[in-house]
Amino acid sequence: MSNKQAKIKFPVWRFLNQPLFSSKTKLVLNPYKFWYLYRIELLERCLAKKCESEGRHYN
């Protein structure tokens, strides 16, 4: 995989559409902190997905 494909861009729309008065999520106004928390959340979502080849065993 080339470096161009692996680069994740900043989620501008998600940053701008944060809920203002939500008791579930905290508003993050610092873009660097938001980017850091977003990457952690993305990694957690990717690791939580079940791998399709998990049940297959190759000899």
Image (tube, grey):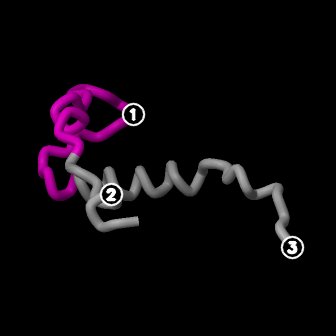
Q: Quadrant of the C terminus?
A: bottom right
State the SS at label 1. Answer: loop
Q: Quadrant of the N terminus?
A: bottom left
Q: Residue at x 73, y 56 (%)?
A: 53
The kind of residue on which mark 3 rests is Asn
Q: Nearer the viewer, mark 2 or mark 1?
A: 2
Where does label 1 land, which residue? 24
Res. 59 mark:
3
Q: Which residues are magenta?
A: 11-34
Q: Is residue 9 above or below residue 2?
A: above
Q: Is residue 18 above or below residue 51?
A: above
Q: Is residue 49 left or right of residue 43?
A: right
Which mark sits nearer the N-terminus, 2 or 1?
Answer: 2
Which mark sits nearer the N-terminus, 2 or 3?
Answer: 2
State the SS at label 3. Answer: loop
How many residues crowd mark 3 within 10 Å: few (<14), some (14–19), many (20+)? Answer: few
Is mark 2 in CB contact (under 8 Å) with mark 1? no
Quadrant hosting residue 22: top left
Which mark sits nearer the N-terminus, 3 or 1?
Answer: 1
The kind of residue on which mark 1 rests is Lys
Where does label 2 land, which residue? 5
The kind of residue on which mark 2 rests is Gln
Q: Is residue 19 magenta?
A: yes
